[in-house]
Amino acid sequence: MFNDDTIKVLKRVGLITGAGLLMLLITAAINRKLAMPVLATEVVVNPLEGNVFLIDSTDVVSIINKSWGESLDGLPAGNIDPDRIERFLEEDAFVKNAEVAITANSKVKVIITQRQPVLRVIDSEGVQYYLDETGSRVPLSKHFTARTLVATGNIPHFTSDFQLRKKHLLKDLFELTQTILADPLWSAMFEQVYVNRRNEFVLVPKVGDQLVILGGVDNLEQKLRRLRIFYQEALSHEGWQKYSTIDLRFKGQVVCERN
């Protein structure tokens, strides 16, 4: 018969052996999974508001194949580096975020979050692009034209550091865009920002023939507050078509020109 100490030793040996066998089984399973060929690359592109796609699944697969040098389908799953693929994809101008994983059934799963355009820019030389909600440049898409505020006129070339500059017209334009979009009234009312030769901003409403001369973005909140009061008190009585321009450049005043 075994004494208590011997039984404890045997139990300990059994546990160690069992744990070792379990590790071997897990390792073997992992190795088999890594050796399995990739069966497919599945891409999900999350749509923007209005079911808009600036980039589609075919574009995503093309980016992956070009960056990797070949199709992932058929390659051993162990050769695929999800982090590397995510970096490739996030270098694309349309991609805000990419998540890549290898599934249990040996498929590469890709989930794409697109950049959200907030402003379409047509600069002084006719170059067109979008700015997204972070101020990053996004090219026009071959799939869809995003419905955004449009900026035209005397707009300088895009520079990636424009938000870091102490003074830059694009920086002011982006600030104005964010202010307009943050307010339901202004985002519903204005469709275009025009930059004149004096680098002043002129707002073009969706309804009516008025031009709202804003000037610069200095005291922007006060200017828009005066405009809101003017719309509520004056135009509600006199109508939209009575004025051709509404000028907010002068402190504490709203100067109008009649048709």
Image (cartoon, grey):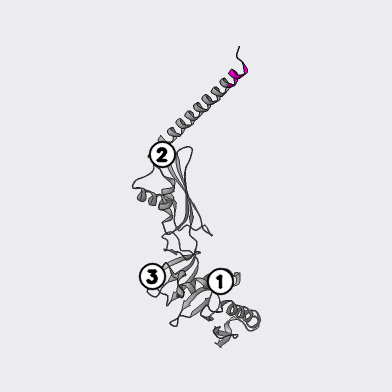
Distance Cα–Cα, label 3 vs label 2: 44 Å
Residue 74 in the image: state x and y as whole percent: 38, 39
Is mark 1 in CB contact (under 8 Å) with mark 3?
A: no
Query: Toward which corner of the image does residue 219 lie, by quadrant?
Result: bottom right
In the rendered image, which residue does mark 1 sit on? 179
Q: Is residue 131 above or below residue 34?
A: below
Q: In which quarter of the image is the N terminus?
A: top right
Q: Residue furthest left?
A: 69
37 part of magenta stretch: no
Residue depth check, mark 3 versus mark 2: number of the one nearer the observer = 2
| Viewer-nearest residue: 66 or 25 | 25
Q: Give the residue type at disc 3.
A: Val
Distance Cα–Cα, label 1 vs label 3: 24 Å
Find numbered disc 1 in the image and state the secondary structure of the residue it sits on. helix
Residue 96 in the image: state x and y as whole percent: 47, 57
In the rendered image, which residue does mark 3 sit on? 127
In the rendered image, which residue does mark 2 sit on? 78
Q: Does residue 55 appear to the left or right of 256 in the view shown?
A: left
Query: Toward which corner of the image does residue 239 lie, by quadrant?
Result: bottom right
Q: Give the residue type at disc 2.
A: Gly
Question: Of helix, strand and loop, which mostly describes the magenta segment?
Answer: helix
Q: Give the residue type at disc 1.
A: Thr
Q: Residues within 10 Å of mark 1 (few under 14, many from 20)?
A: some
Find numbered disc 3 in the image and state the secondary structure of the residue it sits on. loop
Q: Residues within 10 Å of mark 2 (few under 14, many from 20)?
A: some
Q: In this view, does 208 lie above or below 142?
A: below
What's drawn in magenta, residue-wise?
Answer: 1-8
- Identify the residue shown where x is 52% and y is 28%: 19
Residue 118 in the image: state x and y as whole percent: 50, 66
Is mark 3 in CB contact (under 8 Å) with mark 2?
A: no
Residue depth check, mark 1 versus mark 3: number of the one nearer the observer = 1
- Identify the residue shown where x is 35% and y is 50%: 66
